[in-house]
């Protein structure tokens, strides 16, 4: 049973437009959510996170929104750049075992020039 | 940030054999993690390796299949034993962020294993 779901395997957007990547979770115990970005032949790199006490966190072009009632979070990238093309993983953790990350399967974002 | 290297970067192995993957970090860390990503699947935590103690395995993973060593604070190995084609995966090690936020982890580049 997948506790973190990324239902879109891929997304294609034009350079300069907004990219919206979605993630749903089922475990109510999750209280910390993260997005990782992965380029081919490299390990995932941390991008942005949000605690369950917030509904929005922004870092430059990247904003993560959390809707706890819907158990849904999204990552917005504005404006999208070709260098943003990568696989984006949503991850979640809970409480004292916050090192135990549960990942989604990832969404491949392609930003076209 | 932590710089993590893994060896080998990739390998093709025969079923029934074992492969040991090395993970080296450029700084001392208490916790190191080992993940597996099977084709088309998400990253799954295999175990947590603490220096000076036995590794802690997640549900579905056992020490006989995935023995782990942690001889010091900068190095760990994961062995995939008695391999079968189902073990074909990318294996990654990671360490917590230096701020102490264990959810924010630095990952190595991964070891791509193919079992034939």
Image: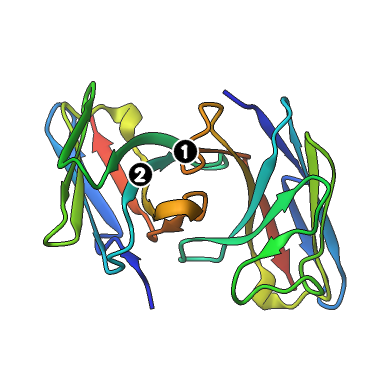
Q: Residue B82, image x and y in percent? A: 83, 76
Q: Nearer the viewer, residue A107 or B33?
A: B33
Q: Is residue B92 left or right of residue A28?
A: right
Q: Nearer the viewer, residue B75 or A88?
A: B75
**Element assignment for label 2:** strand
Whether the residues at callouts 1 and 2 have beta carbons within 8 Å, the answer is yes
* Figure check: A101 above or below A12: below
Give the quarter of the image for residue B58.
Answer: bottom right
Above or below, comparing residue A11 to residue A61 in the picture: below
| Residue in the picture at 82% in, 71% down | B81
Residue at the spot of label 1: B104
State the image coordinates of residue A9 (x, y, percent, origin top left). Answer: 30, 60
Left or right: residue A63 compared with residue B33: left
Quadrant of the frame with the C terminus of chain A = top left
Mark 1 surroundings within 10 Å by alpha-carbon count, few (fewer than 14), some (14 through 19), many (20 or more): many
Q: Quick check: B103 above or below B58?
A: above
Q: Is residue B110 visible?
A: no
Question: Circle 2 sits on which residue?
Answer: A34
Residue A81 visible in the current orientation: yes
Q: Chain of mark 1?
A: B
Of all chains, the one bearing label 2 is: A
So how many labels did they put on this image? 2
Name the quadrant of the N terminus of chain A: bottom left
Between A107 and B68, the one lying in front of the other is B68
């Amino acid at each position: 049973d997948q506790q973190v779901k990324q239902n879109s395997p891929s997304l294609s957007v034009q350079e300069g437009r907004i990219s919206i990547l979605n993630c749903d979770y089922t475990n109510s115990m999750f209280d910390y959510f993260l997005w990782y970005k992965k380029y081919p032949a490299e390990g995932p790199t941390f991008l942005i996170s949000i605690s369950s006490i917030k509904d929005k966190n922004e870092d430059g072009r990247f904003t993560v929104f959390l809707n706890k009632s819907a158990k849904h979070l999204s990552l917005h990238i504005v404006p999208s750049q070709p260098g943003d093309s990568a696989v984006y993983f949503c991850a979640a953790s809970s409480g004292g075992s916050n090192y135990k990350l549960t990942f989604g399967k990832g969404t491949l974002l392609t930003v076209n020039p | 940030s932590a710089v993590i290297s893994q060896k080998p970067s990739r390998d093709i192995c025969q079923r029934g054999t074992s492969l040991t993957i090395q993970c080296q970090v450029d700084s001392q860390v208490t916790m190191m993690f080992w993940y597996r990503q099977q084709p088309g699947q998400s990253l799954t935590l295999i175990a947590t390796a603490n220096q000076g103690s036995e590794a802690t395995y997640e549900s579905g993973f056992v020490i006989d299949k995935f023995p782990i060593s942690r001889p010091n604070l900068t190095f760990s190995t994961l062995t995939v034993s008695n391999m079968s084609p189902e073990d074909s995966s990318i294996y990654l090690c990671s360490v917590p962020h230096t701020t102490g936020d264990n959810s924010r982890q630095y990952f190595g580049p991964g070891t791509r294993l193919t079992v034939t």
